[in-house]
Amino acid sequence: MKILVVGSGGREHAIAWRLAQDAEEHEIYCAPGNAGTLDVATNVAIKADDLEGLTAWAEAEKPDLVVVGPEAPLVAGLVDALAKVGVPAFGPVAAGARLEGSKRFAKEIMDAAGVPTGKAEVFTDAAKAKAALPDYGLPVVIKADGLAAGKGVIVAETTADAEAAIDDMLVGNKFGAAGAEVLIEEFLHGEECSILAMVDGENAVLLPSSQDHKRVFDGDKGPNTGGMGAYSPAPVVTSDKLPLIKEKIILPVVRELKKRGIVYRGILYAGLMVNDENANPHGPLAKSGSTVNVVEFNARFGDPETEAVLPRLGGSFATALLHAATGCLKNEDIVVKPETAATVIVASGGYPGSYEKGMSISGLESSVASPSTIVFHCGTAVAEDGGVRTSGGRVLSVTGIGANLREAVDRAYGQVEKISFEKMFYRKDIAHRAFERG
């Protein structure tokens, strides 16, 4: 197949890489791609948010499939635009991508579909939002309604922190239009995990479970980031929970959207909170009787979850994507290998705040000969001297593959230690929750 992957991060590198592992030989393009995607694809100098440029390229080049990585072009309607020129795309139309583009809309859909989730209210007035805080207790979650690059969610441990987050969004305009509406949401206790479901408008097939690490520092300390690491599978998602997740969360959402005239095709990413002890007796766990509640929905492959999940898939990845995009997905399209994968994000000093770019990266060549580690590029560019330099906050996504989680984690960190650039840092405790479970 001739396939265009839209985006420039680790997720897109992983998608292009996995397509290149298919037994069939594909002609793969990335727009705009990064220094790493050059190893498996041809980069096209069109930005992911240039809908007109991407549509024009697709109309002229006629790819068999376009795979849209980031959320912003999905919310902006790239899949809709491609449909108008007759090019199939993997990803939801703009109306479906609102599940990620508007947390308010996502709550509305969940409530209508009977999906278990936390109590939440929407506010545009800071004073009214602050007045509602006592109803939610502490900790409390403050969310910007719109897209904020994974940084628009604040878990406030104190009232002062919650009020500051409300002021940042509604008064200080920290997230621009994304924070014009704010959700105050009940904090759900338990262990968080991610399920990526491939959806064809009617049916859904769950991909392997994973767990992300959002906080920037070891021990889950510091501000939220776009993700500092992940591993798959997540032990908290036991086999008995998978039918519950599919039948009580994924499919009800797909059906509720269809009722509204929205045919959802692509990835439906469910960020879940699992609590087997029912440790929040006053919250929705007690009301719904469910030990699995939805924290959020995303409308695309997660990042860095994708870098841990895709190396575990066998079969023809391109066929699975095309079948989902064209409404004929089959259970057998998804083949899961028994290996475990762990991913460590290597970041620029200062991330998720301000950071410097243009640092020269060394040690990347050490991964080429290793079948048990893969280095996906998240924020890199080719330097004038032909080397690779940093161009983002999250720079590299280093994945180790092993027979068990300990082996996968050790291989990932062993590879990370061979890489260096000025002010690089990474978490040292990826998968700590799984190891603590024993």
Image (tube, rainbow, N blue to C red):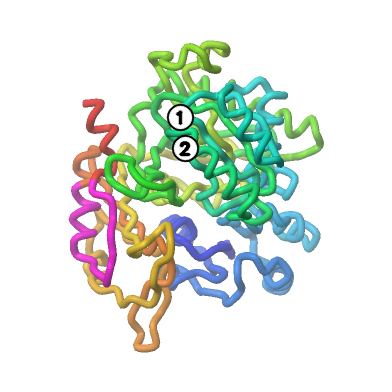
User: What range is drawn magenta here?
Assistant: 410-428
Say which amino acid is labelled 1: Pro
Q: Secondary structure at mark 2?
A: strand
103 drawn magenta:
no
34 left or right, relative to 55: left
Q: Which residue is mark 1?
A: 139
Q: Which residue lies at the image location 19% right of the left edge and 64% below the top edge?
A: 418
Quadrant of the drawing holding the C terminus: top left
The amino acid beneath tag 2 is: Val
| Image location of residue 411, percent across then percent down | 20, 51
Left or right: residue 246 compared with residue 232: right
Q: Closest to the observer: 282 or 374?
A: 282
Look at mark 2 in the image and give the residue it sits on.
Answer: 155
Q: Position of residue 364 (x, y in %)?
A: 27, 69
Screen quadrant of the N terminus: bottom right
Q: For the residues labelled 2 and 1, say whether their Cβ atoms are less than 8 Å apart.
A: yes
Q: Position of residue 414 (x, y in %)?
A: 18, 55
Q: Is residue 68 above or below residue 105?
A: below
